[in-house]
Image (tube, coloured by chain):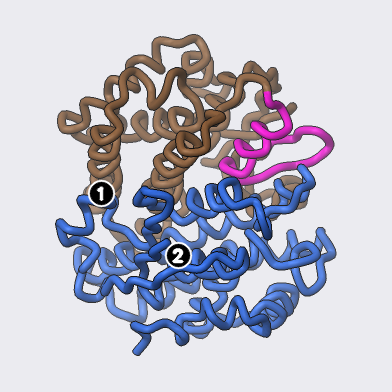
Chain colours: A blue, B brown
């Protein structure tokens, strides 16, 4: 498999976590988002959405990290990301999709660029925007985790949810978001980041990191 | 089942489409987003994300429409939303998640409110923002549909993808988005909207419509 991604793209990071957790080997193919390489015709002919990550796998160019994670678990059932229990599967997806839809999307690079270039906002306004959406989802997420009474991971081992959460906590720290009120998430973060799979998936461990 | 939603919320509309396609009966419980009823303690104690839709089903309050759709298909395998073929499942999810993450999220009501109230933008700037994100995902989506050579539906019958697409096309029309370059999507829209399931799920058919 070939993973076309960018070291600091949180959806690329998410998919690296998923692949590492499943123990699937892949070739890392950097796409330089700062140079808009994802908009080159050579890339958009394969992925019209002009997004990373794109996974070349089993004869097909696959876009959309959440769809790829669902596919990976179906095509490669070993080391499942989702638990087998129906209700646990729902819980993992509910929390993961809260992060992937409500939290991640307004923080996506194209949105931040639009705020800066089309709407003329300065970095301070953009940072405030960023932290606003982090708080809006991370604080209720912490409440949901408290209701679930989880420990080092959502369930017994890290999986679907943790692969989505950890890259967003990395972003939260980059933007100096205060995680004091999120002890359960910080505990999960510490437990994950101590594992070799998450170490290998970390942005700083990627060949295009700078 | 009880569906807590709002007539014009596109994620509520999405979930109504899914329930109707699966033939699952539910009670419609309107939550008035314009009066911020989703932020009442009586609601957030059940759904800390303060979002609609919320589905009360099988003894549990469930948030996040995409997670609920995945759960519905697993808990109620009759009339599946996702095809059984592994590659078709991936296709349906890739397109649905493109809409659910990249397109829907920047158009969400809280985001539009932030642009207006915190960032001081006028309706014209907000409408331009809205159409910008519609174009950014709908045009590549149309290209993907062309690659797939689909007809009235993505596959043989409407399902996971159509439930997500139709509410966004409803939004696109509300914001006078030009769909001339999207003939495949418009064909799917026409075919879906002629079906009783989509008629019943339509915003105008809801008890809280005004």
What chain is tagged by disc 2?
A
Q: Quadrant of residue A157?
A: bottom right
Q: Which residue is mark 1?
A: A48
Is B190 placed above or below B85 here? Answer: above
Which residue is at the far bottom? A210
Is B116 placed above or below A204 here? Answer: above
Q: Is residue A40 visible?
A: yes
- Judging depth in this view, the residue of A64 and A187 nearest the camera is A64
- The crowding category of the residue bearing disc 2, from other C-alpha atoms within 10 Å (few below 14, some 14 to 19, many at least 20), is many
Q: Quadrant of residue B35?
A: top right
Report the side of A197 relative to B103 (left or right).
Answer: right
- The crowding category of the residue bearing disc 1, from other C-alpha atoms within 10 Å (few below 14, some 14 to 19, many at least 20), is some
Q: Residue at x 46, y 56 (%)?
A: A65
Q: Position of residue A152 (x, y in %)?
A: 78, 74
Q: Is residue B210 visible?
A: no
- Whole-angstrom CA distance, mark 2 to mark 1, is 17 Å
Q: Position of residue B89 (x, y in %)?
A: 50, 36
| Residue B57 included in the magenta stretch of the image | yes
Magenta segment: B55-77
Report the side of A88 relative to A105 (left or right).
Answer: right
Q: Position of residue A193 (x, y in %)?
A: 64, 82
- Judging depth in this view, the residue of A138 and A195 nearest the camera is A195
Q: Which residue is mark 2?
A: A11
Q: Position of residue A173 (x, y in %)?
A: 53, 83
| Residue B185 included in the magenta stretch of the image | no
What chain is tagged by disc 1?
A
Q: Residue at x 31, y 20 (%)?
A: B151
Report the side of B189 relative to A155 (left or right).
Answer: left
Badge 2 or badge 1: first in the primary sequence: 2
């Amino acid at each position: 498999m070939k993973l076309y991604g960018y070291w600091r793209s949180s959806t690329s990071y998410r998919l690296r976590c998923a692949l590492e957790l499943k123990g699937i080997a892949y070739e890392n193919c950097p796409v330089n988002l700062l140079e808009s390489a994802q908009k080159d015709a050579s890339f958009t002919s394969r992925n019209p959405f002009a997004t990373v990550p794109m996974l070349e796998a089993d004869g097909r160019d696959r876009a959309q990290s959440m769809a790829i994670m669902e596919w990976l678990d179906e095509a490669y059932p070993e080391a499942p990301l989702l638990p087998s229990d129906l209700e646990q599967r729902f819980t993992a997806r509910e929390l993961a999709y809260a992060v992937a839809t409500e939290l991640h999307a307004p923080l996506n690079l194209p949105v931040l660029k639009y705020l800066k270039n089309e709407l003329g906002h300065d970095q301070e306004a953009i940072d405030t925007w960023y932290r606003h959406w982090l708080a809006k989802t991370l604080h209720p997420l912490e409440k949901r985790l408290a209701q679930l009474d989880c420990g080092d991971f959502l369930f017994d081992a890290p999986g679907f949810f943790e692969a989505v959460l950890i890259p967003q906590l990395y972003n939260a720290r980059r933007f100096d978001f205060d995680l004091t009120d999120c002890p359960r998430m910080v505990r999960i973060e510490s437990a994950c980041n101590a594992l070799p799979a998450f170490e290998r998936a970390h942005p700083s461990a990627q060949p295009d990191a700078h």
